[in-house]
Structure formats: structure tokens, C-alpha cells
Amino acid sequence: SDGDVNVDLSAAIEVEFSEEMNRQPTERALAVTPELDLRNFRWRGRTLIAEPLELLPDTTTIVVRVAGTASDYHGVAIAAPHRFAFSTGEVIDTGVVAGSVTARGQPVAGAIVWACLELAAPDSAGVLDACGYASATDDDGLFRIGNLRPAARPYALVAFIDSDGDGRYSVSMESGRVVTDAAFLAAPADSVGGIEVPLADTDEGRSGMPRDAGRPRGPRSAAQPDTLGTGEALREVAE
């Protein structure tokens, strides 16, 4: 459940709802970061059980999100998106990176943002797979990525418009930007904010990774753990 530590690496992720759910949309609304392959879905009454194909990563804070597109048996969407975090290590990481995504100086809503310690090169098709922890910008173009661990090297940020909805960044086809060395979190509760990520214009002629923007930032203030709006719609279990 939310805040659990030392969770077994073989644990399944369970989300219990207060009523019968429309199963396929609810399964599609479930996301986990760092990204795990959750193809094995099953239901036990009102509880959605997702079994990762591989063991959970060791000593890692795992964030589970249920998007607002999840709906009940009658097609009524849940009241609000929900998230919870647990850890396979001894602590829940609480580092935060926050900022905004813009295009030609204007805020961009709905952009996908990743915070990554390890950033691979695009594959042969010019596509970047999801890495690290993820968020999306709100109506004002703002993003906040929590539950980040401190590290000896800076986080990179990847922001893009997921035009085809596949959850991956097609460098040559989708408007985006990669900012290497964007934020340095040295201590467990460090918070770095005010990072602006300007998306590349479609006429920049991108053929590989977009050019970096900005400079590395260090911690500005102590971070507070994310506030979870659990409501009465669901509760979370990792066991």
C-alpha cells in the first residue's frame, strides 16, 4: 500500500476499487514508473491485479498511477486521478523536479515529461523508449515529478508531445526536447524547480536527439512528499 517499504521483488500490484469497474479502460489507465511491463492483468472481484513480467527493481521507489480515464461498470469515470508509491528498499524517495514545457514561449498542456538518470540513444527508427519517472504537464504547461532518488549525477529531462499515443518519443516525428544535466539532487529531500523545457519547432530539421536547453540546476529547497488524493474510490495494495 502507499508508503510501504521493503516490498518483495516478486510482489504484484493490486488496486481495489469501491465498485465494479469497466475492466479494459481501467487496465489501460494503470501506469507504473519506472516503467514495468504489465501485460499480465487479472481481476479478483473489484480488485485489479497487475503482475509484472519481471521482478520489481531492487531498492527502488515505484509509483503507481490510475488515470482519470478509468471508469466503473456504468462508464462513469473516477472522481480524480490517483497515485501511490511504495519501495523495494528501506525508504520512499522524495526528491522532486518541477518546471514548465513551452513552445514558442507559450505553455504546452499534455506534454509527456520523463526524468532519467540513464538516457539511451534513439533506436534505429529514431525512437526513445520511456526512461525513469514520468509526468504530464497540466493546463498551464507545468509539470512535477516526485519520488526521485538522490544521485551522484544529474537527471536528464525528456519532454515531448506524444502525437501517436504510443508512450515513446519519436525524435524525427514528434515535437520534443531533451535536456541533459537538467537537475542535480544530492540529498534525499532535494527539490529543483523552475526548469523551462522549450519544445523544438517542427522546422528545426531534427534528425537525432534535440539540442540541449538550459544548464544543470541544483537543489533549491527541501521537498515534501506528494499529496495523494485517495478519496473513497479505490485503495492500493502491493503484495
Image (cartoon, rainbow, N blue to C red):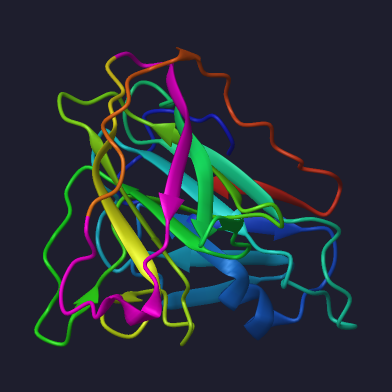
Q: Is residue 133 highlighted in magenta?
A: no
Magenta span: 187-211
Q: Tell me: residue 177, above or below residue 94.
A: below
Is residue 84 visible to us here?
yes
Please tell me which residue is depicted at 16% across the width and 87% down the height of the picture.
Answer: 125
Observer-nearest residue: 186 or 82?
A: 186
Q: How many labels does the image show?
A: 0
Q: Tell me: residue 232, above or below residue 121.
A: above
Q: Quadrant of the N terminus?
A: top right
Within the image, what quadrant is residue 87 found in?
top left
Left or right: 139 with respect to 237? right
Q: Tell me: residue 52, above or below residue 238.
A: below
Please tell me which residue is depicted at 30% across the width and 50% down the height of the picture.
Answer: 56
Image position, residue 186 (x, y; %): 27, 16
Image position, residue 163 (x, y; %): 48, 83
Image position, residue 214 (x, y; %): 31, 40
Please tell me which residue is depicted at 62% across the width and 53% down the height of the picture.
Answer: 141
Image position, residue 236 (x, y; %): 64, 47
Is residue 145 visible to us here?
no
Left or right: 227 with respect to 108? right
